[in-house]
Image (tube, grey):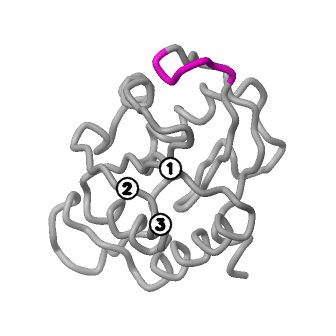
Protein backbone atom coordinates (compact mmCIF):
# COMPACT_ATOMS: atom_id res chain seq x y z
CA UNK A 1 0.00 0.00 0.00
CA UNK A 2 1.14 3.47 -0.78
CA UNK A 3 0.34 6.02 1.92
CA UNK A 4 -2.80 8.15 1.51
CA UNK A 5 -2.72 11.74 0.22
CA UNK A 6 -0.41 13.89 2.31
CA UNK A 7 -0.74 17.47 3.48
CA UNK A 8 1.54 19.94 1.71
CA UNK A 9 -0.09 23.03 3.23
CA UNK A 10 2.34 23.48 6.09
CA UNK A 11 6.05 24.13 5.74
CA UNK A 12 7.28 21.08 7.63
CA UNK A 13 9.80 18.41 6.73
CA UNK A 14 8.83 15.70 4.27
CA UNK A 15 9.14 13.06 7.00
CA UNK A 16 6.75 14.95 9.32
CA UNK A 17 4.01 15.62 6.74
CA UNK A 18 0.66 14.19 7.79
CA UNK A 19 -2.47 13.49 5.74
CA UNK A 20 -4.80 16.04 4.25
CA UNK A 21 -8.59 15.67 4.57
CA UNK A 22 -8.81 13.59 1.39
CA UNK A 23 -6.03 11.32 2.65
CA UNK A 24 -7.83 10.78 5.95
CA UNK A 25 -11.05 9.85 4.10
CA UNK A 26 -9.09 7.57 1.75
CA UNK A 27 -7.39 5.69 4.58
CA UNK A 28 -10.76 5.10 6.24
CA UNK A 29 -12.28 3.90 2.95
CA UNK A 30 -9.34 1.55 2.36
CA UNK A 31 -9.76 0.09 5.84
CA UNK A 32 -13.48 -0.43 5.23
CA UNK A 33 -12.67 -2.14 1.91
CA UNK A 34 -10.06 -4.40 3.52
CA UNK A 35 -12.48 -5.48 6.25
CA UNK A 36 -15.34 -6.04 3.77
CA UNK A 37 -13.13 -8.19 1.53
CA UNK A 38 -11.46 -10.06 4.40
CA UNK A 39 -8.00 -8.71 3.52
CA UNK A 40 -6.86 -8.43 7.12
CA UNK A 41 -3.13 -8.53 7.83
CA UNK A 42 -1.52 -10.31 10.76
CA UNK A 43 1.20 -7.66 10.88
CA UNK A 44 1.85 -4.20 9.45
CA UNK A 45 5.34 -3.04 8.47
CA UNK A 46 5.12 0.70 8.01
CA UNK A 47 7.54 3.50 7.18
CA UNK A 48 8.12 5.68 10.23
CA UNK A 49 7.05 8.83 8.34
CA UNK A 50 3.97 10.62 9.70
CA UNK A 51 1.85 10.08 6.57
CA UNK A 52 2.40 6.31 6.50
CA UNK A 53 1.72 5.96 10.23
CA UNK A 54 -1.44 8.05 9.90
CA UNK A 55 -2.53 5.98 6.90
CA UNK A 56 -2.22 2.85 9.03
CA UNK A 57 -4.13 4.47 11.88
CA UNK A 58 -6.87 5.53 9.45
CA UNK A 59 -7.31 1.94 8.28
CA UNK A 60 -8.52 1.15 11.82
CA UNK A 61 -7.17 -2.40 11.73
CA UNK A 62 -7.27 -2.56 15.50
CA UNK A 63 -6.06 -6.15 15.89
CA UNK A 64 -3.06 -5.69 13.58
CA UNK A 65 0.32 -5.24 15.29
CA UNK A 66 2.26 -2.28 13.90
CA UNK A 67 6.01 -2.09 13.38
CA UNK A 68 7.38 1.30 12.32
CA UNK A 69 10.54 0.91 10.26
CA UNK A 70 12.82 3.84 9.36
CA UNK A 71 14.28 1.81 6.47
CA UNK A 72 10.90 1.91 4.68
CA UNK A 73 11.05 5.71 4.36
CA UNK A 74 11.53 6.22 0.59
CA UNK A 75 12.80 2.64 0.34
CA UNK A 76 13.92 1.09 -2.92
CA UNK A 77 12.30 -2.20 -4.04
CA UNK A 78 15.25 -4.30 -2.83
CA UNK A 79 14.92 -2.81 0.66
CA UNK A 80 11.18 -3.51 0.66
CA UNK A 81 11.87 -7.11 -0.31
CA UNK A 82 14.51 -7.47 2.40
CA UNK A 83 12.03 -6.17 5.00
CA UNK A 84 9.34 -8.56 3.75
CA UNK A 85 11.79 -11.47 3.94
CA UNK A 86 12.21 -10.79 7.68
CA UNK A 87 8.45 -10.92 8.34
CA UNK A 88 7.13 -13.73 10.50
CA UNK A 89 3.36 -13.21 10.13
CA UNK A 90 1.29 -15.15 7.60
CA UNK A 91 -0.32 -12.04 6.08
CA UNK A 92 1.70 -8.83 5.93
CA UNK A 93 0.74 -5.25 5.10
CA UNK A 94 3.53 -2.93 3.96
CA UNK A 95 2.85 0.81 3.79
CA UNK A 96 5.56 2.84 2.09
CA UNK A 97 6.24 5.57 -0.48
CA UNK A 98 6.57 6.07 -4.21
CA UNK A 99 8.48 5.46 -6.33
CA UNK A 100 9.76 2.44 -4.38
CA UNK A 101 6.41 0.88 -3.45
CA UNK A 102 5.14 1.10 -7.04
CA UNK A 103 8.28 -0.56 -8.39
CA UNK A 104 8.14 -3.16 -5.62
CA UNK A 105 4.53 -4.07 -6.44
CA UNK A 106 5.36 -4.32 -10.15
CA UNK A 107 8.40 -6.52 -9.47
CA UNK A 108 6.59 -8.78 -7.02
CA UNK A 109 3.66 -9.78 -9.23
CA UNK A 110 3.88 -12.52 -11.82
CA UNK A 111 1.46 -10.55 -14.01
CA UNK A 112 0.25 -7.01 -13.33
CA UNK A 113 -3.48 -6.33 -13.06
CA UNK A 114 -5.11 -4.65 -16.03
CA UNK A 115 -6.10 -1.64 -13.91
CA UNK A 116 -4.92 1.57 -15.62
CA UNK A 117 -3.51 3.01 -12.35
CA UNK A 118 -1.35 0.05 -11.37
CA UNK A 119 1.86 1.34 -12.96
CA UNK A 120 1.20 4.91 -11.76
CA UNK A 121 0.41 3.74 -8.21
CA UNK A 122 -1.34 6.88 -6.93
CA UNK A 123 -1.64 7.69 -3.23
CA UNK A 124 -3.47 4.95 -1.38
CA UNK A 125 -2.97 2.41 -4.18
CA UNK A 126 -3.20 -1.06 -2.70
CA UNK A 127 -2.26 -4.41 -4.20
CA UNK A 128 -3.36 -7.60 -2.50
CA UNK A 129 -1.36 -10.62 -3.60
CA UNK A 130 -0.73 -14.22 -2.68
CA UNK A 131 2.91 -15.28 -2.84
CA UNK A 132 4.11 -18.75 -3.68
CA UNK A 133 6.72 -19.34 -1.00
CA UNK A 134 7.15 -21.62 1.99
CA UNK A 135 8.34 -18.68 4.11
CA UNK A 136 8.77 -14.95 3.57
CA UNK A 137 12.53 -15.48 3.78
CA UNK A 138 12.38 -17.35 0.46
CA UNK A 139 10.00 -15.09 -1.45
CA UNK A 140 11.27 -13.92 -4.83
CA UNK A 141 10.33 -11.20 -7.31
CA UNK A 142 7.52 -12.39 -9.55
CA UNK A 143 6.09 -14.72 -6.89
CA UNK A 144 2.90 -12.71 -6.34
CA UNK A 145 -0.48 -13.55 -7.81
CA UNK A 146 -2.73 -10.46 -7.72
CA UNK A 147 -5.98 -11.00 -5.85
CA UNK A 148 -7.05 -7.35 -5.95
CA UNK A 149 -5.88 -3.86 -6.77
CA UNK A 150 -7.72 -0.74 -5.64
CA UNK A 151 -7.25 3.00 -5.40
CA UNK A 152 -9.11 5.28 -2.99
CA UNK A 153 -10.75 7.09 -5.91
CA UNK A 154 -12.64 3.87 -6.77
CA UNK A 155 -13.90 3.70 -3.17
CA UNK A 156 -14.75 7.34 -2.53
CA UNK A 157 -16.11 8.71 -5.84
Element carrying mark 1: loop
In the picture of the structure, the residue carrying the numbered disc 1 is 42
| C-alpha span from label 2 to label 3 | 19 Å
**Is 100 situated above or below 66?**
above
Q: Tell me residue 55's x, y (percent).
A: 42, 67
Residue range corresponding to the magenta coloring: 132-137
| C-alpha span from label 1 to label 3 | 21 Å
**Is 148 situated above or below 27?**
above
Neighbor class of circle 3 (other Cα within 10 Å; few <14, some 14-19, many 20+) is many
Neighbor class of circle 1 (other Cα within 10 Å; few <14, some 14-19, many 20+) is some
Element carrying mark 3: loop
Look at the numbered discs 1 and 3 and tell me whether their residues touch, using CB distance below 8 Å. Answer: no
Closer to the chain start, of discs 2 and 3, is: 3
Residue 49 forms part of the magenta stretch: no
In the picture of the structure, the residue carrying the numbered disc 2 is 65
**On the image, which quarter does residue 83 sit in?**
top left
Look at the numbered discs 1 and 2 and tell me whether their residues touch, using CB distance below 8 Å. Answer: yes
Q: Tell me residue 112's x, y (percent).
A: 76, 34
| C-alpha span from label 1 to label 2 | 7 Å
Amino acid sequence: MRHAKSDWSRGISDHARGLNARGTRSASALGDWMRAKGYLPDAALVSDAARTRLTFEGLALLATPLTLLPELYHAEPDTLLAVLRRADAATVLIIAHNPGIASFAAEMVAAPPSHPDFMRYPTGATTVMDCEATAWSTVQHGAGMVRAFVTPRALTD
